[in-house]
Image: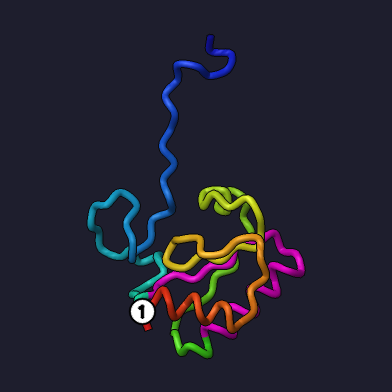
Amino acid sequence: MSLFSFGKKKEEKKAPACCCKPASGTEKAPAAECCGAPVAGICCVKVLGAGCKSCHTLYENTQAAVRSVGLAVEVEYVTDMKKIMEYGVMSMPALVVNEQVVSMGKVLKAADVEKLLRRQSGC
């Protein structure tokens, strides 16, 4: 019955680890290649997209929102489909804050991204 993978153990999908939120629940020190120390509760901001116009628009709006909120965090633009699939995102563009998908399939305006960032940071 291995034709349809019956009886095989399913692999656990691990969310990508971040310095602000370890994947396995074990405390670990921030890695040097990680996003750095959290600033106002936010350490990672990523835009996931395939490189289309709407993805670039979300990236630009996110950069503008990060600047207007006053965060010293770099916005990362991820186009690698393997990395995007690790987040479980099926529609793009998507916005990831602190390794959690907060929006997918929508081009958010800068004001909407600001609201999400303020909610995540607790301000």
The residue positioned 41% from the left and 45% from the top of the image is 14
Q: What stretch is highlighted in magenta?
A: 42-66
Kind of element beneath mark 1: loop
The residue positioned 24% from the left and 52% from the top of the image is 26
Residue 82 in percent (x, y) is at 58, 48
Q: What residue type is labelled 1?
A: Gly
Q: In this view, does 95 lie to the left or right of 92?
A: left
Q: In this view, does 67 lie to the left or right of 91?
A: left
Residue 67 in percent (x, y) is at 53, 88
The residue positioned 30% from the left and 49% from the top of the image is 24
Residue 105 in percent (x, y) is at 65, 60
Residue 62 higher or lower than 78, as above or below: below
Residue 59 higher or lower than 69, as above or below: above
The C terminus: image quadrant: bottom left
Viewer-side residue, 62 vs 123: 123
Residue 5 in percent (x, y) is at 53, 19
Q: In this view, does 111 lie to the left or right of 8?
A: right
Q: Mark 1 points at which residue?
A: 122
